[in-house]
Amino acid sequence: MTVYDMANLAVKVADLEAALDFYRTAGFSTTEPEEWAGARRAEVFLGPVQITLFTRAIYDDVHPMPEGFLHPALFTDDLDAQLVGHDVIWGPQVVEGSFGRRRIAFVRAPAGMVLEFMEDLGAAPIRRDT
């Protein structure tokens, strides 16, 4: 098992549009908001770092989180092996969206942190203008 890359840093915001306005005004690229898993989300590209803004964490029902930093999302080559010995709070589950198809799980980490581990199951769908 290997963690080989970071997908993003997840951040919970109460006002997605205001947050996107802040980052756009600061000169960063963003995606348009989209509905996903009972919430809204959008990507912000801060040079080499990508943050994903969410209006609700996918695991809020079992591990509620306040507004602010949620977790780093880390790619692993073997999700099941990565989860051994961890306190899993959500998942594993397959999710899909503009980011592609992934199998994800969230675990408790020291100091109240959460880590997301994910296996990439397929590329993002090709978007075509109609």
Image: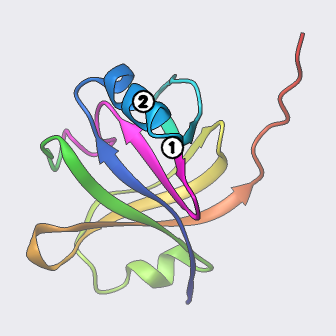
Under mark 2, the amino acid is Leu
Residue bearing the label numbered 1: 44
Render colour scheme: rainbow
User: In the image, what residue occupies the spot 34% across and 41% down?
Assistant: 58
Residue bearing the label numbered 2: 20
* First-in-chain label (2 vs 1): 2
**Residue 56 or residue 24, whichever sits in front:** 24
Q: Is residue 89 located in the magenta-colored stretch of the structure?
A: no
**Residue 85 or residue 23, whichever sits in front:** 23
Q: Is residue 116 left or right of residue 122?
A: left
Rendering quarter of residue 39: top left
| Residue bounds of the magenta highlight | 44-61
Answer yes or no: do the residues labelled 2 and 1 have beta carbons within 8 Å? yes
Q: Is residue 127 above or below residue 104?
A: above
Q: Secondary structure at mark 2?
A: helix
Quadrant the N terminus occupies: bottom right
Image position, residue 17 (x, y; %): 38, 20
Q: Is residue 52 above or below residue 46?
A: above
User: In the image, what residue occupies the spot 14% across and 79% down?
Assistant: 110
Image position, residue 106 (x, y; %): 34, 62
